Image (tube, rainbow, N blue to C red):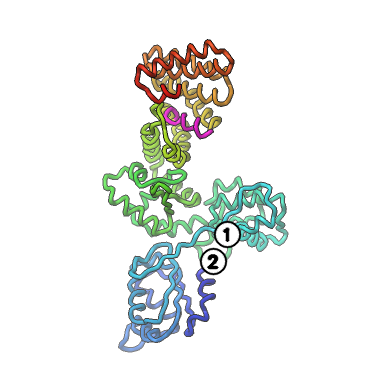
Amino acid sequence: MALQVAASLKNTFVDGITFVPLASTTDPRRVPAAIAESLGVQERRGHSLAEAVRHVLVHRRQLLLVDNFEHLLPAASHITDLLLVCPRLKIMVTSRARLRLGGEHLSAVPSLSLPDSDIAMSPAALLQSEAAALFVYHARAVNPAFVLTPGNVPAIAAVCQRLDGLPLAVELAAAKSRTLTPAALLPRLTQRLRLLTTDRQDVPGRLRAMRPAIDWSYDLLATRDQTLFRHVSVFSGGFTLDAAIAVANDDDDASIVDGIESLLDNSLLRHETQQDGEIRFSMLETIRAYGLEALDRAGETVRTRGLHADWCVNLAERSPLALMGSGDGREYDRLDREHNNLRAALNWTLEQGKTETSLRIANAIWSFWHHRGHLTEGSDWLDRALAASVDIAPEVRVRALLGRAFLAYAQGDLHLSEIYAEESLDIYRTLDKPVGIGFSLLCLGLVAESRDQDEESIRLLNEALGLFRQQRHYFLWRTS
């Protein structure tokens, strides 16, 4: 891409454009020599190589395209030195990390545009996506018999979406077209870091597979930042700074802020400001897969997943919705943003047999599922948790029964709703919890109303209303 930009500027620089490759340069002290070599400048007696370069460039209107600077950041001062002495010189640097120089102008390279998820998309419409066009181009390069058809359009679109539109990942995936159809490739992307490789000899070794390409950025991080990268990879769908602090379990908040900045600088995180001003961070899924592998290799998965689940419990139980109360649109929006994190925590805690934690999350957000229309999903989570909750304290289990009753009612399953509501009512009466009793009666009253059992419905709803009034639970009083 940088070469294309440079080519478009060739008429601007009368003294030409010089490409300076640094991928194979490992010592920052060798940067002046690499620039000199690209310019054809030789060291002169009595002058350093850097001085010789400055002497040649001082009056030139020229562009230097310096490629792959991220592993040589201590040499960034050489860039400043050249620009100070050579007023007509321009330097374009490609780097996965900021150089942190005064006057530096950043231009982030976004992922390729992705195809829509419309399964009825035509081949011509698919090729409007940059990622899909790149896939088809490289698939044809390795397999001349490859044909884009209406039949393989959905699989190609899904492959590109799964790979986040990362050019290298899409190219490596397309290279498998000699042996795999797009449909056969798609399910294998669960092992994307192992699958995405090539044996091409005309590209640098780090670009022949996804794992070495990410290794390159990961290895540039300080040890503390590597640890933070591994820990925040447990977040699914993004996270806030406060969430990162909770999962990193580091008393030094300032170091977490610095670490987040480092991950952003090294292109391992993205950031986005929400409409309410909240800043969220996220990883491309291919980067996140690498982080999860690194987390597992470091033996940190169980501890970090546990901290993530604790954060999810705290997030869910702090919600007004968790108190059987009202929640405004902002509260629902917040839970929407964190829904993938809550799903990940529910899944992990159920797999690990941490049923009480699963129930606490589900109990706190079932009204969110109800309001946002996630009825089947919410029911499935509650069913899984209840099935494993035989030994869980009644005061925890009963809230799941109540949530299940309301979701069943919303789904139109009046019989199942009645069963769960009656069971929750019995437990709440035993525990002497008036609000819980009222809530169970409310659900039973709604069931009776749906069955046109007017007298029974009025009796149950009036009893619920009295309990809500007695407990000063004004939201439920008004609702009833």
Element assignment for label 2: loop
User: In this picture, which residue range is highlighted in magenta?
Assistant: 362-373
Is the Cβ of the residue at disc 1 closer than 8 Å to that at disc 2? yes
In depth, the one of 390 and 298 nearer the eye is 390
Q: Is residue 311 magenta?
A: no
Quarter of the rendering containing residue 85: bottom left
Please give left or right for residue 123 compared with residue 396 in the image. Answer: right
Residue positioned 47% across, 79% down in the render: 18
Q: Amino acid at mark 1?
A: Thr
Please give left or right for residue 27 compared with residue 196 in the image. Answer: left
| Residue 171 to residue 279: above or below | below
Please give left or right for residue 277 compared with residue 186 in the image. Answer: left
| Residue 448 to residue 264: above or below | above
Q: Residues within 10 Å of mark 1 (few under 14, many from 20)?
A: some
Residue positioned 38% across, 83% down in the render: 53
Image disc number at residue 203:
2
In depth, the one of 279 and 241 nearer the eye is 279
- Residue 82: x, y in percent? 36, 78
| Residue 383 to residue 23: above or below | above
Residue positioned 41% across, 68% down in the render: 69
Residue positioned 47% across, 16% down in the render: 461
Q: Residues within 10 Å of mark 2 (few under 14, many from 20)?
A: few
Q: Main secondary structure of the magenta part?
A: helix
Image disc number at residue 115:
none
Q: Which residue is mark 1?
A: 198
Q: Amino acid at mark 2?
A: Val
Counting residues from the N terminus, which is met first, the one under dot 1 or under dot 2? 1
Q: Is residue 368 magenta?
A: yes
